């Protein structure tokens, strides 16, 4: 069974500020659809007089991620909320390969025709040499 890692999503916006226009539009148009599509995420909507609208995401592992949504449209907020709902809450890190060599091969990568006669590679494997 899949357990979504996003626990809470809190939308903080000003009821009168111009930067919060997209957040207010999200509340009017898309918040209910988002809540229906993600029933396991609790969506809090908090109209407060704050300087800039925020989207706070709280994950099961305790991570809290803040996203600034000033001057964003309702569609952009829906995309951001959906992205946050799909993430695990862990930091995004570069995955490195578990091996390292000081002398990399200069011969190239192996492929199925590496040790075959060169006639096959020039004319193709199904054609017979003349």
Image (cartoon, grey):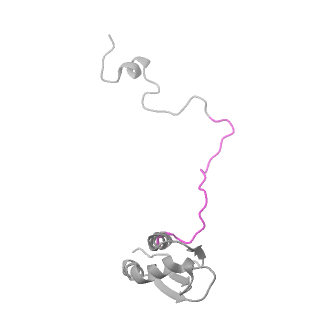
Number of labels in the image equals 0
Q: Residue at image x 53%, y 82%? A: 11
Query: Does 40 sit above or below residue 105?
Result: below
Horizontal placement of 30 versus 87: left or right?
A: left
At which x and y percent is residue 108? 55, 31
At which x and y percent is residue 99? 62, 47
At which x and y percent is residue 19? 56, 77
Q: Residue at image x 45%, y 74%? A: 74
The foreground one among 77 and 122 is 77
At which x and y percent is residue 66? 60, 76
Q: The C terminus lies in which quarter of the figure? A: top left
The foreground one among 78 and 7 is 78
For residue 92, say whether it is visible: yes
For residue 60, say whether it is visible: no
Q: Residue at image x 47%, y 85%? A: 42
The foreground one among 68 and 107 is 68
Quarter of the image holding residue 47? bottom right
Q: Residue at image x 43%, y 27%? A: 113
Range drawn in magenta? 85-104
Horizontal placement of 96 versus 40: left or right?
A: right
Dominant secondary structure (helix, strand or loop) of the stretch shown in magenta: loop
């Amino acid at each position: 069974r899949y357990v979504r890692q996003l626990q809470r999503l809190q939308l903080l916006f000003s009821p009168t500020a111009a930067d919060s226009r997209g957040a207010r539009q999200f509340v009017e148009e898309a918040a209910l659809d988002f809540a229906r599509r993600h029933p396991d995420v609790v969506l809090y909507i908090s109209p407060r007089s704050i300087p800039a609208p925020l989207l706070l995401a709280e994950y099961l592992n305790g991570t809290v991620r803040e996203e600034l949504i000033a001057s964003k449209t309702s569609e952009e907020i829906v995309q951001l909320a959906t992205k946050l709902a799909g993430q695990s809450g862990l930091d995004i890190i570069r995955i490195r390969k578990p091996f390292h060599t000081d002398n990399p091969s200069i011969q190239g990568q192996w492929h199925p025709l590496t040790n075959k006669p060169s006639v096959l590679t020039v004319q193709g494997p199904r054609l017979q040499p003349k």
